Image (cartoon, rainbow, N blue to C red):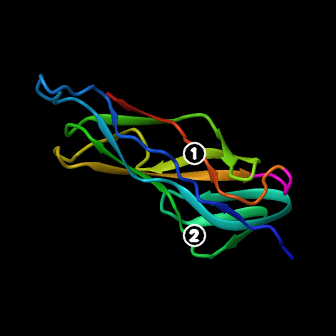
């Protein structure tokens, strides 16, 4: 029986990012790219045995596990990361995922987060006229170690994504 319960309520810190720095004295850049964090990624609650494994969330918000991981429904929600982009119609946007990041636990220990695929796939062209925004959803995979390296607790950290406008 699995005795450990891990809650990976990954509260990924998000910030509004600006492709161009807006100022109060100049008109807005009509070709600027603006990124807004709408939803942080969370893997919900799960339990793992001695071997660990992975928990994944797809861009569509579907959760799955591998290895010695049991997904639990204890009221801790899981969801994908969602950002909105504001850019001129016809802008071609490419996304580059940052490196894997180590998440730290509230009771010590660590897990590794790999940012996965996103929807829409890139490159893509924006079609929405500002102030309308284009939504982009990201999935990810959490690699969980054994009970000693990834003890129960809340794990958190930040990941990096680069949005390029062509």
What is the spatial separation of the Cα atoms under label 1 and label 2, in whole angstroms?
Answer: 21 Å
Identify the residue position indicated by label 1 in the image: 115
User: Nearer the N terminus, badge 1 or badge 2?
Assistant: 2
Q: Who's the residue at 44% across and 37% down the image? A: 95
19 versus 118 height, above or below: above
For label 1, the SS is strand
In the picture, which quadrant includes the N terminus? Answer: bottom right
* Residue lying at the far front of the rendered structure: 107
In the picture, measured across the screen, residue 130 lies left or right of residue 151, that is: left
Q: Main secondary structure of the magenta part?
A: loop
Q: Judge the density around disc 1: few (<14), some (14-19), many (≥20) Cα neighbours within 10 Å.
A: many
Q: Quadrant of residue 35?
A: top left
Q: Who's the residue at 84% across and 57% down the image? A: 147
In this rendering, which labeled residue sits more in front, label 1 or label 2? 2
Instruction: From the top left corner, tell me how far across and down residue 53 is, in percent.
Output: 77, 57
Q: How many marks?
A: 2
6 versus 10 height, above or below: below
15 versus 78 height, above or below: above
In the picture, which quadrant includes the C terminus? Answer: top left
In the picture, measured across the screen, residue 19 lies left or right of residue 10, that is: left
Instruction: From the top left corner, tell me how far across and down residue 98 is, in percent.
Output: 55, 34
Q: Is residue 55 magenta?
A: no
Q: Which residues are magenta?
A: 144-148
Q: Who's the residue at 64% across and 39% down the image? A: 101
Q: Is residue 147 magenta?
A: yes
Q: Judge the density around disc 2: few (<14), some (14-19), many (≥20) Cα neighbours within 10 Å.
A: some
* Residue lying at the far top of the rendered structure: 26
For label 2, the SS is loop
Instruction: From the top left corner, tell me how far across and down residue 61 is, in percent.
Output: 50, 63
Identify the residue position indicated by label 2 in the image: 76
Q: Quadrant of residue 3?
A: bottom right
In the picture, measured across the screen, residue 23 lies left or right of residue 60, that is: left
């Amino acid at each position: 029986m699995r005795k450990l319960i891990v809650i990976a309520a990954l509260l990924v810190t998000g910030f509004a990012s600006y492709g161009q720095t807006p100022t109060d004295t100049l008109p807005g850049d009509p070709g600027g790219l603006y990124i807004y964090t709408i939803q942080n990624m969370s893997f919900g609650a799960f339990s793992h045995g001695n071997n660990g494994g992975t928990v994944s969330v797809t861009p569509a918000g579907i959760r799955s596990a591998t290895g010695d991981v049991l997904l639990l429904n204890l009221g801790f929600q899981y969801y994908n990361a969602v950002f909105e982009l504001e850019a001129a119609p016809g802008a071609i946007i490419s996304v580059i995922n940052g490196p894997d990041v180590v998440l730290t636990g509230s009771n010590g220990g660590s897990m590794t987060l790999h940012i996965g695929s996103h929807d829409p796939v890139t490159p893509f062209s924006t079609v929405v006229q500002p102030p309308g925004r284009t939504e982009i959803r990201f999935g990810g995979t959490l690699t969980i170690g054994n009970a000693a390296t990834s003890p129960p607790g809340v794990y958190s950290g930040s990941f990096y994504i680069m949005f390029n406008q062509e």
